């Protein structure tokens, strides 16, 4: 049996490649709190340019970079419109409320991941002393592996703008959305006042996110980042990984999408599994609850990591090869052949 573990839990689990480590080792560094780190400065310039913004800020995590954006767009007693399933609302510890005194107004995500325009319109509160001030629309792309199309994004940001709202995009996986649609990174974020991009998901860097926005916004963002504990010193070793990732690992996301499609097709042939069709590198498989414990044990024995449950999320990434996908399909097929015969 191979010693190599196949890890389908998330695209955050990748190991920095030898070439990425070499770029990190060679990076010139300085104290970034003084603005002295040339590699951080270069990452910020390159990212701002790639996505079409005036400026950018390197943050240690996407959670922090989203929080900085929310705190820049909204003040105490303001609110932001956000999907019920959105990372900023659901998976960031309520940081906007706890640390920003910002009230979320969650809106049900449609099956395609979008927020219905009528719902957005409906939840914008009138200027009335009873209400929090609605300031911001925050969207996420991709969301649960689903792509919000460029047309929808244009409509949603136009609506927000017409109602005087700012717009923020949680673009943790915006590169997946752009590659899937065959559009430029600039086109994928068009219309948004700010975007947070994760380097540590499918792009394969060990750490970090970049917040892009207007110059004055990013200048003010440095203050919040310092307050939140995100002022880093010789961070160029980390920024170098991000630069390497942006240069080498964006176009190849198409391979992850192809591997997810291959995996889903292989699993769909198995009786008893309900398998969603992936749009990018993340998809869900409904596993019969009675099979979950045994499947979990089998996968562990076969050196396959997955968060098995009735609604199992599977994620492909740069450390999952096509051969790995074939092995996972074979293990699942053998397991269910035996399980279904019992
Ligand atoms: C991972 C992720 C983030 C932020 O992640 P960190 O783990 O804090 O870097 C934000 N939004 C989405 C959609 C994510 O998947």
Image (tube, helix red, strand yellow):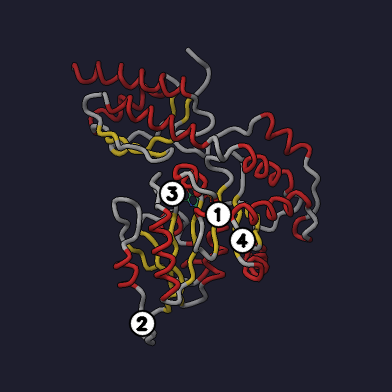
**Residue 274 location (% of width, % of height):** 25, 34
Q: Secondary structure at mark 1?
A: helix
Q: Residues within 10 Å of mark 2 (few under 14, many from 20)?
A: few
- Write down the quadrant of residue 313 in the picture: top left
Which residue does the numbered mark 2 point to in the structure image?
126
User: In the visual, does 308 lie left or right of 187?
Assistant: left
In the picture provided, is 258 more to the left or to the right than 212?
Answer: left
Name the residue located 70 percent from the left edge and 55 percent from the top edge: 45
What residue is disc 3 on?
142
Give whichever of 227, 149 is nearer the camera: 149
User: Quadrant where the C terminus lies?
Assistant: top left
Residue 199 point in image, percent of width and height: 59, 45
Q: Point out the frontmost of discs 1 and 2.
A: 1
Element type at mark 4: loop
- Pointer 4: what residue? 53
Query: Looking at the image, is mark 2 or mark 4 earlier in the sequence?
Result: 4
- In this rendering, the answer to whether 313 lies above or below 164 is above
Count residues near mark 1 (Cα–Cα under 10 Å), then give few for <14, some for 14-19, many for 20+. some
In terms of sequence position, does the residue under pointer 1 or pointer 3 come before the other?
Answer: 3
248, above or below 224, in the image: above
CA–CA distance in space, label 1 to label 2: 33 Å
C-alpha span from label 4 to label 1: 9 Å
The Cα–Cα distance between marks 3 and 4, rounded to whole angstroms, is: 20 Å
């Amino acid at each position: 049996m191979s010693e190599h573990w196949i890890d389908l839990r998330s695209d955050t689990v990748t190991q920095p490649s030898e070439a990425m480590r070499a770029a990190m080792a060679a990076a010139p560094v300085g104290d970034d709190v003084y603005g002295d780190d040339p590699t951080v400065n270069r990452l910020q310039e390159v990212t701002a340019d790639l996505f079409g913004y005036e400026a950018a800020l390197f943050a240690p995590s996407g959670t922090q970079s989203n929080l900085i954006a929310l705190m820049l767009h909204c003040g105490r007693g303001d609110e932001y419109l956000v999907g019920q399933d959105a990372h900023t609302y659901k998976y960031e510890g309520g940081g906007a409320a706890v640390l920003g005194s910002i009230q979320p107004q969650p809106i049900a995500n449609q099956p395609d991941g979008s927020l219905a325009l009528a719902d957005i319109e409906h939840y914008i509160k009138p200027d009335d002393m009873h209400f929090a001030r609605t300031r911001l629309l925050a969207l996420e792309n991709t969301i649960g592996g689903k792509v919000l199309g460029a047309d929808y994004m244009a409509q949603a940001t136009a609506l927000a703008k017409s109602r005087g709202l700012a717009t923020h995009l949680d673009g943790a996986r915006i590169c997946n959305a752009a590659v899937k649609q065959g559009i430029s990174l600039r086109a994928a974020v068009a219309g948004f006042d700010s975007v947070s991009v994760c380097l540590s998901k499918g792009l394969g860097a060990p750490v970090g996110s970049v917040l892009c926005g207007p110059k004055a916004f990013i200048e003010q963002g440095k203050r919040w980042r310092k307050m939140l504990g995100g002022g880093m010193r010789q961070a160029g070793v980390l920024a170098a990984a991000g630069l390497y990732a942006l240069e080498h690992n964006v176009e190849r996301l198409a391979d992850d999408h192809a591997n997810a499609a291959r995996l889903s097709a292989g699993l769909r042939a198995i009786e008893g599994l309900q398998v969603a069709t992936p749009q990018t590198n993340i998809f869900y498989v409904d596993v019969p609850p009675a099979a979950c414990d045994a499947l979990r044990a089998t996968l562990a024995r076969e050196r396959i990591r997955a968060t098995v449950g009735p609604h199992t999320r599977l994620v492909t990434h740069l450390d999952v090869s096509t051969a790995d996908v074939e092995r996972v399909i074979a293990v699942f097929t053998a397991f269910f052949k035996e399980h279904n015969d019992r």
